Amino acid sequence: MFSEVPIDKGRLKKEDIDREILRVSIAAEMDATSLYEQMASMTDNEDLKVVLLDIAQEEKTHIGEFHTMLLRLDEEQEKELEKGKKEVEELTGKK
């Protein structure tokens, strides 16, 4: 879990900062999603479970928002994402 931003701005080029902010944001949202889903599976309180899973779903939307912004700012990321998708399709025989 992130309690502080794990980016050393002094070690990054100015043009790389926004991409790194987005990557850290994606990681934080994925961590939060996992945490809420794990806690939901631990509780017997159905109301709490519903709330935790709803919040986890919202975090997935946040991941999508940050990911969309990252793809706008990093052409290489977009190309590699497409390569990864094709590799999985080839390995599994499924689209």
Image: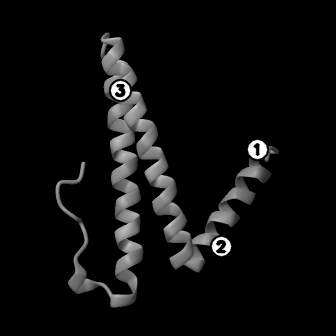
- For image coordinates 24% across by 48% down, the residue present is 1
Name the amino acid type tagged 2. Lys
Label 3 or label 1, whichever lies nearer to me, is 3
Label 2 or label 3, whichever lies nearer to me, is 3
Report, in whole angstroms, how far the alpha carbon at label 3 lies from the one at label 1. 35 Å
Q: Are marks 2 and 3 in contact (CB under 8 Å)?
A: no
Name the amino acid type tagged 3. Val
User: From the viewer's perspective, is 38 left or right of 70?
Assistant: left
Query: Camera-side residue: 33 or 76?
Result: 33
> What residue sits right under mark 2 in the picture?
79
Which numbered disc flags the more N-terminal residue, 2 or 3? Answer: 3
Residue 27 higher or lower than 80, as above or below: above
Name the amino acid type tagged 1. Thr
> What residue sits right under mark 1 in the picture?
92
- For image coordinates 62% across by 69% down, the residue present is 80
Percent across and percent down for residue 43 are 30, 16
Residue at the extreme top = 44
Quarter of the image holding residue 94? top right
Residue at the extreme left = 3
Q: Label 1's element? A: helix
- For image coordinates 33% across by 89% down, the residue present is 14
Residue 81 higher or lower than 57, as above or below: below
The numbered disc on residue 51 is: 3
Rendering colour mode: one colour
Report, in whole angstroms, how far the alpha carbon at label 2 lies from the one at label 3. 37 Å
Q: Label 3's element? A: helix
